[in-house]
Image (spheres, grey):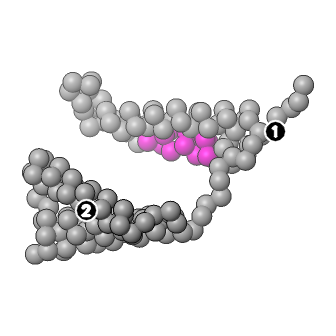
Amino acid sequence: MTRSRIDVQDLLFGLFLVAVATGTLVATRNLTIGHAADMGPGYMPRVVALALMAFGVFFTGRGLWRAGRGIAPVQLRPLLAILASVGVFALTAERLGLAIASVAAVMLASFATREGRLVETVAFAVVLSGAAVLLFVKLLGLPIPIWPR
C-alpha cells in the first residue's frame, strides 16, 4: 500500500476558499435571506458563499488525499492581459461607449493566449459587442452609452 503525500497548493487554495466563504457568511449574517421566489438582500451572497465553501471543501479534500502537481504556477502573460482587459473596459465604457469598449476588452484579453488568430478574434469581439449592446442596452434598458458621446 502506497501512502499519498499532501498536495500543499490544493490544500492552501481550498482553505483560502473556505476562509473567504466563512467571512462572507459572517458578514451577511444580519441580512434577511428570504426564499427563492422572494429573495432578500442576503440570499445571493449566502448562496454564492455556500457554493464557494463547497469548492473549498473539495479542493481541501483533494489536497489531503491526492498526490500530484496541484495548481499550475501563475503565468504572467494571461494574468496581465485579463487585468488590462478589465481595466480598459472599466475606464472606457462610459467615454467610448459599450460597443467600442467591448471590442477593446476582447482584443486585449486575446493576448492571454498565443493560440488566438486576428481574424477570429476581431469577429468574436464584434459579435460579443453586438450581443452586449442588445442585452444590456436594448433588452434590459440600462443607461449605458453605445457609442462615444
In this picture, is 68 found above or below 85?
above
Q: Position of residue 28 (x, y in %)?
A: 37, 39
Image disc number at residue 5: 1
In the rendered view, would you say 99 is above or below 136?
below
Residue drawn at (13%, 47%), measured in percent from left and top? Answer: 140
Q: Residues within 10 Å of mark 2 (few under 14, many from 20)?
A: some
Left or right side of 110 for 122 = left
| Figure quadrant of residue 10 | top right
Q: Residue at x 25, y 72 (%)?
A: 92
Mark 2 lies on residue? 126
**Residue 76, image x and y in percent?**
57, 68
Amino acid residing under circle 2: Val
In percent of width and height, residue 138 lies at 9, 52
Q: Earlier in the sequence, mark 2 or mark 1?
A: 1
Which of the 4 quarters of the picture holds residue 130?
bottom left
Report whether residue 142 is seen.
no
Q: Which residues are magenta?
A: 13-24
Residue at position x 70%, y 39% from top? 63
Q: Nearer the viewer, residue 128 or 14?
A: 128
Task: Please tell me how crowded label 1 is: few (under 14), some (14-19), or many (20+) other residues with Cα within 10 Å.
Answer: few
Locate the C terminus and report the quarter of the image it occupies.
bottom left
Q: Which-is-in-front pick, marks 2 and 1?
A: 2
* Residue 87 lies in the magenta-colored region: no
Query: Where residue 114 sits: x, y (%)?
Result: 52, 66
Per the picture, the main secondary structure of the magenta-coloured stretch is helix
